Amino acid sequence: MTEPTLLVLASLADGEKHGYAMMEDIQRFAGVRLGPGTLYGAITRLEQRGWIEAVESEDRRRPYRMSPAGREYLKDQVAGLDKVLQTAMRRLEHSV
């Protein structure tokens, strides 16, 4: 999984957001500023995979939400990352 994909899914894990709100949220929690091209490219890929979906809105901004399939995918990815992080921490503790 690419980093923008993970960041967008993590941002949507706590509720619906439009693109600018995702950019701000991602910068707050990850310290990463995604440019519009990177963000909307990730949104397009996630929609095509069925992991997020657009939400009807009367506003000109288009909010998105994570689908159940997206939530399962994110859980799987986070579990894999957690395993890598735990291994790295254990090895660092024993390194010289």
Image (spheres, grey):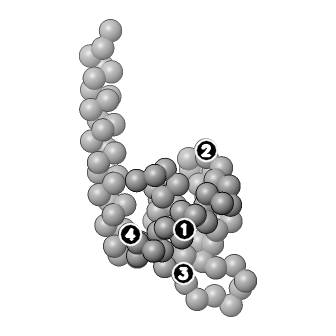
Q: Is residue 47 left or right of residue 89?
A: right
Q: Nearer the viewer, residue 4 or 90?
A: 4
Mark closest to the chain's N terminus, 3 or 4: 3
Q: Which residue is mark 3?
A: 54
| Farthest top residue in view | 96
- The relative height of residue 73 versus residue 33 in the rendered view (above or below) is below
Q: CA distance from mark 2 to mark 4?
A: 23 Å
Mark closest to the chain's N terminus, 2 or 4: 2
Q: Which residue is mark 2?
A: 31
Q: Secondary structure at mark 2?
A: loop
The amino acid pointed to by label 3 is: Ala
Q: CA distance from mark 2 to mark 3?
A: 25 Å
3 and 4 marks in contact (CB < 8 Å): no
Q: Position of residue 43 (x, y in %)?
A: 54, 68
Mark closest to the chain's N terminus, 2 or 1: 2
Q: Is residue 20 left or right of residue 72?
A: right
Q: Which residue is mark 1?
A: 43
Callout 4 crowding tier (Cα within 10 Å): few <14, some 14–19, many ≥20: many
2 and 4 marks in contact (CB < 8 Å): no
Q: CA distance from mark 3 to mark 1?
A: 10 Å
Q: CA distance from mark 1 to mark 4?
A: 12 Å
2 and 1 marks in contact (CB < 8 Å): no
Q: CA distance from mark 2 to mark 1?
A: 19 Å
Mark closest to the chain's N terminus, 3 or 1: 1
| Farthest right residue in view | 60
The amino acid pointed to by label 2 is: Gly
Q: Which residue is mark 4?
A: 70
Q: CA distance from mark 3 to mark 4?
A: 13 Å
* Numbered marks: total: 4
Q: Which residue is located at x 48 percent, y 58 percent?
A: 5
Q: Which residue is located at x 64 percent, y 68 percent?
A: 19
